[in-house]
Amino acid sequence: MESHKIEFGTVVGPHPRTARAGFDTLFAGGNAVDAAVAAAFAEGVVEPMHNGIAGYGGCMLIYRKKTQDVIAIDYNSAAPATASEDMFTIEDAPDAVAGYRVSGRVNVHGPLSIGVPGVVAGLCLASKEYGSLPLSDVLRPAINSARYGYAPNGATRSGITGNAERWKKEFPETARVFLKDGNPPKKGEVLTNPDLAKTLEAVAEGGHEAFYEGHIAETIANHIQDLGGCLTVDDLKNYRAIITDPYKIKYRDYSVYTSPLGAGGLTTLQMLRLVEGYDVPEMSITERFHLFAEAMKICWVERLRRFGDPAFVDIDIDDELSDSFTAKLSEQLKSGLESPQPGEVVYYEPMSCTSHISTADAEGNMVSLTQTHGGGFGSMVTVPGTGLLFGHGVGRFDPRPGLANSIGPGKRPLHNMGPCLATVNGMPFATYGIPGGRTIPNNQLNISVSLMDLQVSAQAALDAPRFHCDGAEPIQVESRAGDETLEGLRELGHKISASGGIGGPGHAIRLREDGLFQDGGTDPRGEGKVISR
């Protein structure tokens, strides 16, 4: 859409109800944080395949125009206190890409996959510390969608259809909540979740404590333990979302911010540091993707071998983004550009089902927020009487012992979410993010370059063809890049796999002239919405 002067602000989200919840909150006098929290709670109702109030977690960046600073809120899941790095049985599996699998995949689906859910804690903290409206007002759109119903989008309908028979056998409460008379909803049919509406009303009245302590917490913990899980009342009571500093680099004339580990944004920043030494605007798309491919191979191996919860793993972020470390990686990059190699698989569990929301208000404040269940419908466990479908935070750990991202009591897992904000000379420039599992850090590289190097609109940055490699070839390239690009990459020595779509749906807002002029974009790969006025 064209940039235009803003009276209230801009909200972009993956479901029309999500964007409307955020914009109505701006219209009611809320700021960008209020809008993001309202949209995120609503998203947790209307896109249950990707997101939920009991989703395992998320991360948020807040740019405050008045003080020209950026704050991060980390609400990643935490493993239960009794979780351990050897809690799952690892089987040799020569037919699997990485040569192993977890017996029964119980680390991904079912009660043992559930860590402490962070979504409610993170959103309540943001509202309390940086919002301007009462939490009860901000939660009203989500409560209404749960009580009076919403029409699931295509992705959610497809996900419900694909899982319906399994739910009937293994997850009966989930089947009861999301099937209509035992059948998946058809296009245009409305789903309600009255139990979830009651849970949300309790949060609206009591905030964080209403969810993590008392009756709701006891109901959650008792049911999960009855199923064989290890989440306890104390795990819930002791959980806190964290206000912290974001990671930051200078990229050309811009300051780029992202959420800290375990989020995926550090990998995006490292790749940006690598490509900054090249004249990206003058490159053809083939040359640009060749550069990206070799940067991705290097940075993904670093990520999957060494990164983990910084409270448990010795990671010096200043060193990770330093000139000296970038120079070291740059030598590898030069070698790869001259002679591309196959790369390697480090850990293979590429789950993806996530939501991103961006907001900006008329003052120029910005929020970039990504949150998730994990894979589609998370753990697939719904707790009776609450309407809560749980994410699978434990499933985000590497199930093998002795590694940086192995499971540990209270440990927070490595994940791929990586919302970004960018400023120029301290002034707001852009808020952007995208779902898609491991494609997230790579697509954030692509969007960043489109916005800052190619100087395109928010919509054009999301429309652009995408590219993905998480350590090993073949490399995925969207067919929309064109046959010439695919053949050009093969001629340069790459193995290429054409794809109909990589990641998405992303969302972005680009701000101009101190935030008074804004343009928003929503991904053509999804069914999202931009609302701006």
Image (cartoon, rainbow, N blue to C red):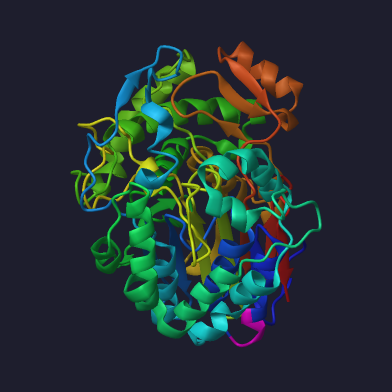
How many numbered marks does the figure carry?
A: 0
Residue 231 or residue 298, whichever sits in front? 231
In the rendered image, the quadrant that contains the N terminus is: bottom right
In the picture shown, does residue 102 fall above or below 387? above
Give the magenta part as a residue range.
25-29
Residue 445 point in image, percent of width and height: 52, 42
Image point (67%, 66%), residue name: 192
In the picture shown, does residue 270 fall above or below 15? above
Q: Note whether residue 22 is visible.
A: no
Residue 255 point in image, percent of width and height: 44, 58
State yes or no: residue 456 in magenta. no
Image point (20%, 31%), residue name: 402
In the rendered image, the quadrant that contains the C terminus is: bottom right
Residue 370 point in image, percent of width and height: 50, 57
Can you name the residue that lies furthest to the right here?
188
State yes or no: residue 26 in magenta. yes
In the picture shown, does residue 327 fall above or below 205? above
Q: Quadrant of residue 129?
A: bottom left
Residue 230 point in image, percent of width and height: 28, 50
Image point (34%, 60%), residue name: 222
Q: Is residue 385 left or right of residue 484?
A: left
Q: Note whether residue 275 is visible.
A: yes
What type of secondary structure mainly makes up the magenta span? helix
Q: Is residue 157 left or right of residue 168?
A: right
